[in-house]
Image (cartoon, rainbow, N blue to C red):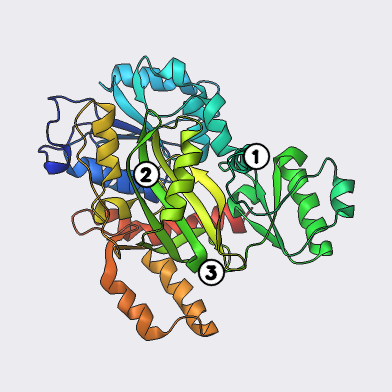
Amino acid sequence: MSDTPHPGLDDRVSGTPPMAPGVVVLGGAHGTLALARSLGAGGVRVHLVSNDTPLPGWSRRVGGTSRWDGPDSGGAVDFLLDLAATHGLRDALLVPGGDAEVRFVSQAAQALSGAFRVMLPPWERLKWMCEKPLLYRRAEELGLDVPKTYRFASLDEAMRADIRFPVVLKPNMGGGDNRLSRAKVVRADDRNAFVAAYRDAVGQIGLDNVVVQQLIPGGGESQFSYAALWRQGQPVAEFTARRTRQYPVDFGYTSTYVEVVDVPEIVAAARRLLGSIGHQGLVEIEFKRDARDGTFKLLDVNPRPWSWFGLAAAAGIDLGALAWQSANGLPVAPAKARPGTAWMYLARDMASAATLIGRGALKPAAYLRSFGAVRAWATFAGDDPVPGLIDLPLTGWRVLTRRILR
C-alpha cells in the first residue's frame, strides 16, 4: 500500500491545510476501520501501525501501513518517533485503537507530543477511567451507580466471602493477551463455579487485576452507551445509543446491532465522570439499565474508537472528522445525531438474532424490519469492499489460531 494521501476533500473536513500531516492509528479493528474510512474519504491521510489484525489495512482509505512489535515493546516510542520523521507524519494526530495502545500513548504522551498531536489526558488522570477498580471508586465518589463489586485481599477470603450469585469476573483493564482478557467476561452462577473461575483468573493475571461484580440481569437491550469527542475537559459532540443486540446474546463479546436513542440520564452521568479528569479525545462509556431499580449502572470506559464507531458518521456526528478538525485547530460545527439510525455487524447479528428468535425474545418480522434502520455496517462499504470480503475468513483464522489451537 502506498503512503500517498487520497485526493480531494469533502464537507466534513473542509478547510484542510495543504499537505496536512494526517492521522496515525495504532492497532484496533472495526473501530479503526470506520475511523480510517471517515477520514480517508475526506482526503485526510491515514497511516496504520499494528501488530494485531490486518483488517483495517485492507481499506482503500488507509494510505500506508507499518508493522511494529506492539505498544508494550521496549522500543515503541523510538519506533513512532522514527516513523514520524521518515514518513512525513510529523504533527499527525496519534489515535490509539486498542486498550493497550491507549495506556501506552497516555503514559508516553510527553515523549510523543514532540512529533505527534496527542488528544488524551496524561495517565495520572486517564487511569481513573481505564482501570476498573479506580473507575468504580471515582464513580462512587461522584454519586454514580455501579454494580455491586467485591474486593478480596486473598484467594482464601474470596472462597469464604458472602457473595450473591450470579457474578461476573473480568480483567481490571482490557488489552491483555490471556484467556480472561480475550473472553472479557466470565460468568459464575454458584460458589463452586466462582472458586474455579476465580482461581484460574488469579493465576492468569494476579489477584489485584481480577474484578468480581454482581451480574445485572438482561442482555443487549439493557445496555446503553454514551459516545463523544471531548476537548480540554468539555464535550465537543456527543450522543447516546442502545446495544440492542450483541454476540453472544447474554455476554456480548461484541455489539451486533446498535441504534441511536436519547438517554439524558447517562449523558449527565458521563459528563460528571469525564469532567472529573478533564478528559479530551474520543470516548465511549458503557452503562447497563438495572430493571430491578431502574438505574443506569456504569460498566466500562473506552477512550478510543469502539467497534460500532461507524454509527457516529452515519447518524450525522462524524466523530473521526471532528477529532481531526479539533486537533488541527479548525472550527467544529455543532451536530446532533439522528435518532433511530442503526449500525450492524451482519454475520454475528444473524447468529445473535437466531438465538433470540429461538428463545422467543425476538420475532422474525421485527428482525427483518430492523434492517430498514441500518445506515452503517461493521465491515461492508460499497466504495471500500475488500475489508467486508476478508472479515469472515480472517475472523475464522483468528478464532482457530488464538482460541482453539491455544
Q: Earlier in the sequence, mark 1 or mark 3?
A: 1
Mark 3 lies on a secondary structure that is: loop
Q: Residue at 37% of width from left, 17% of height from top?
A: 82
Q: Secondary structure at mark 2?
A: strand
Classed neighbour count for the residue bearing mark 2: other residues with Cα under 10 Å, few (<14), some (14–19), many (≥20): many
Question: Residue shown at 38%/51% (left/top)?
Answer: 30
Instruction: Name the quadrant of the N terminus.
Output: top left
Q: Is residue 196 above or below residue 353?
A: above
The location of residue 256, given as percent across then percent down, is 42, 64
In the picture shown, does residue 128 fall above or below 298?
above
Crowd rating for badge 1 (residues with CA inside 10 Å; few <14, some 14–19, many 20+):
some
Give 36 or 294, whichever is nearer the viewer: 294
For badge 3, the amino acid type reads: Val
Residue 320 image offset from top left, x and y in percent: 29, 41
Q: Position of residue 390 (x, y in %)?
A: 35, 57
Left or right: residue 66 versus residue 87 is right
**Mark 3, residue position:** 249
> Which one is closest to the eye, mark 2 or mark 3?
2
User: Of circles 1 and 3, which is in front?
Assistant: 1
**Quadrant of the rendered structure where residue 128 is?**
top right
Q: Amino acid at mark 2?
A: Ala
Q: Residue at 26% across / 56% down in the picture?
A: 315
Q: Is residue 61 visible?
A: no
Of badges 1 and 2, the one in the foreground is 1
Quarter of image, res 244: bottom left
From the viewer's perspective, is residue 101 above or below residue 171? above
Which residue is disc 1 drawn over?
Answer: 137
The reply to whether residue 165 is in sight is yes
Local crowd size for mark 3, using a 10 Å CA cut-off: few (<14), some (14–19), many (≥20): many
Asked whether the residues under the numbered discs 2 and 3 touch, taking CB atoms below 8 Å apart as contact, a structural biologist would say: no
The numbered mark at residue 228 is: 2
Amino acid on which the number 1 mark rests in the picture? Arg
